[in-house]
Amino acid sequence: QKEVEQNSGPLSVPEGAIASLNCTYSDRGSQSFFWYRQYSGKSPELIMFIYSNGDKEDGRFTAQLNKASQYVSLLIRDSQPSDSATYLCAVKGSYDKVIFGPGTSLSVIP
Amino acid sequence: DAGVIQSPRHEVTEMGQEVTLRCKPISGHDYLFWYRQTMMRGLELLIYFNNNVPIDDSGMPEDRFSAKMPNASFSTLKIQPSEPRDSAVYFCASSPPPWQASEQYFGPGTRLTVT
């Protein structure tokens, strides 16, 4: 079992729809969770982080964390073509080690 | 702030040659990470440092890979000898203290091609 897993993708949604990205992790000791966006040929950039169970909202983005289920998700409301990118889930586990998931490619169709 | 600086941005070398990648983290950041990204394996953590001390190098694929951080403003990742399967984008990232919820700031990456 991989340490961090994500929707295999690619995920396609129409413009204006909600995009839902999912991530599961294996280390129950994990403390912090991050969502990064990576455009093709660019480096990852942070969208959101969350470390408490529940929801965290920032503009069109909502991160959801359920530590009991070892599950974290990212919702993108009113998806825009500029949201088309690969989304990486990152988990900080034991000993401050950060592991990235394989990423989910999102395509927003105008 | 200039952000995390990496050099070179592109490197093409022949199999068997030594390759050195360089990274300057953001001033004041205590943590420095080296990642490798390929289509097949995604973003892999190779090694990370805290206050210039290597904390976990379990991701370093083989003895051909080595990393150093002689001071707070400079780190190198060396591959000797290089092989075609080392071709990837290598990212350096730094993170400020305290780190529990702090993001990592990535450099632009070095695209390595080994022929």
Image (spheres, rainbow, N blue to C red):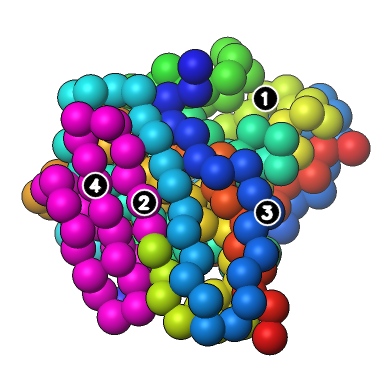
Q: Which residue position is annotated with label 3?
A: A10
**3D distance between C-alphas at marks 4 and 3:** 22 Å
Q: Which residue position is annotated with label 4?
A: A65
**Left or right, residue A97 beside residue B67:** left
Residue pictured at 62% horizontal, 42% vertical: A8
Residue pictured at 42% horizontal, 25% vertical: A3
**Left or right, residue A47 beside residue B15:** left
Tell whether position A56 is magenta: yes
Asked whether A59 or A96 is in front, the reply is A59
| Same subunit, tags 1 and 2 | no
Q: What residue type is labelled 3?
A: Pro
Q: Look at the picture and state if B81 lies above or below B45.
A: above
Secondary structure mainly formed by the magenta segment: strand
Q: Tell me the subunit letter for badge 4.
A: A
Q: What residue type is labelled 4?
A: Leu
Q: Earlier in the sequence, mark 2 or mark 3?
A: 3
Tags 4 and 3 touching, CB below 8 Å: no
**3D distance between C-alphas at marks 4 and 2:** 7 Å
Q: Give the range drawn in magenta.
A: A47-74
**3D distance between C-alphas at marks 2 and 3:** 16 Å
Q: Nearer the viewer, mark 1 or mark 2?
A: 2
Q: Which residue position is annotated with label 2?
A: A73
Residue A15 screen position, x and y as percent = 59, 82
Q: Tell me the subunit letter for badge 2.
A: A
